[in-house]
Image (spheres, rainbow, N blue to C red):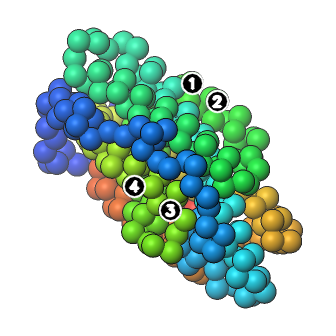
Amino acid sequence: MPELRNVDVKHDRPVPDRQRTAMRLLVSSAHRSFDPAADLDWAAELDPELPGLPLHRVSLYGTDLWHGLSRSQQIELSRHEVASIMQVGLWFELILMQMLLRYVYDQDPRRPHAQYALTEVGEETRHSVMFARAVEKLGPPRYGAPSWVHNLGRIYKATAGGPAMFAPVLVAEEILDRLQREAMADEAVQPLVRGISQIHVVEEARHVRYAREELVRMMPGLSRGQLRRQRAVTALVCYLLADSLIDPRVYRVVGIEPSAGRAAARANPQHRESRRWMAAKIMPFLREVGMVGGPSEALYRKACLI
Ligand SMILES: [Fe+2]
Ligand SMILES: [Fe+2]
């Protein structure tokens, strides 16, 4: 028996034609793009007094462990946390680039939709180099997702398609966007981090538009079984991404055991609230288009994304 189609998925959201949207995005890219190598002051000394993140976004903020740290240790921890977030962001950009290249593989390259996908890959390569240089400049070691998550990423980037390709990318882009908008407006944050945030916010707005519209177009075509699978993959990837953002090894820099720091961060109401705040723009959209729902929804709660 054929599976039911269009279950739980709204169809009434107007979506512009994909070629028209891509054309607009291509024009925007041509007019408003950055070259981080030239547009940021890489030679400027870091200010030792300034944190890498607004301090209230540091995972231990407000805990007993936090109150036991000196001001300079708090600043040091904030730099290591932003370096971890940048490296996990870079990892996810690599995943996205591979998925976009697979996505465009079968498309007509004469069409704006294919050309915009390639343009986005170009922007992401510049972002990844920008994040890599910033971490190098800030000084922390290599941080990232646990190796088993890193290896699961190989399967995901090589096989994902449809909504489960675009929805986790949107979550990654939108949660970083909230953090970066706040950081770029905060004069108490390290200028290099503010500059990077500004570049990323402007260029990611286009990527978000592209991915949101693709998702809205794809959702109504899913059968009930496909919807269940796409939701499950998306929820799992979003959970692992959110859970990996802060590598627990960051806590070593201020003399806290990684497992103790991670446990304190997970229990920290301020940090849990920050996670929900970061996801507050994207989760209602994912729910509206039908991507969040069913048993896999529990994973978003576990990740403090809802
Ligand atoms: Fe990016
Ligand atoms: Fe992006």
Q: Residues within 10 Å of mark 4 (few under 14, many from 20)?
A: some
Q: Secondary structure at mark 3?
A: helix
Which residue position holds label 3? 191
Q: Is mark 3 within 8 Å of ligand 1?
A: no
Q: Position of residue 60 (x, y in %)?
A: 68, 76
Q: Residues within 10 Å of mark 3 (few under 14, many from 20)?
A: many
Distance of label 3 from label 1 (alpha carbons):
37 Å
Distance of label 4 from label 3 (alpha carbons):
10 Å
Residue at point 27% right, 41% down? 32
Q: Nearer the viewer, mark 3 or mark 2?
A: 3
> Which mark is drawn over residue 158?
1
Q: Position of residue 204 (x, y in %)?
A: 37, 46
Q: Secondary structure at mark 2?
A: helix
> Which mark is drawn over residue 128?
none
143, 193: nearer the viewer: 193
Q: Residues within 10 Å of mark 1 (few under 14, many from 20)?
A: few
User: Looking at the image, is mark 1 or mark 4 earlier in the sequence?
Assistant: 1
Q: Quick check: can you spot residue 118?
A: yes
Q: Is mark 1 within 8 Å of ligand 2?
A: no
Name the side, left or right, on which 292 lies relative to 14. Answer: right
In the image, residue 156 sits, relative to residue 295, either above or below, namely above
The reply to whether discs 3 and 1 touch (Cβ–Cβ < 8 Å) is no
Name the side, left or right, on which 209 lies relative to 228. Answer: left
Name the side, left or right, on which 296 lies relative to 256. Answer: left
Q: Secondary structure at mark 4?
A: helix
User: Looking at the image, is mark 4 or mark 3 earlier in the sequence?
Assistant: 3
Residue at point 76% right, 41% down? 147
Which residue position holds label 2? 154
User: Looking at the image, is mark 4 or mark 2 earlier in the sequence?
Assistant: 2
Which residue position holds label 4? 198
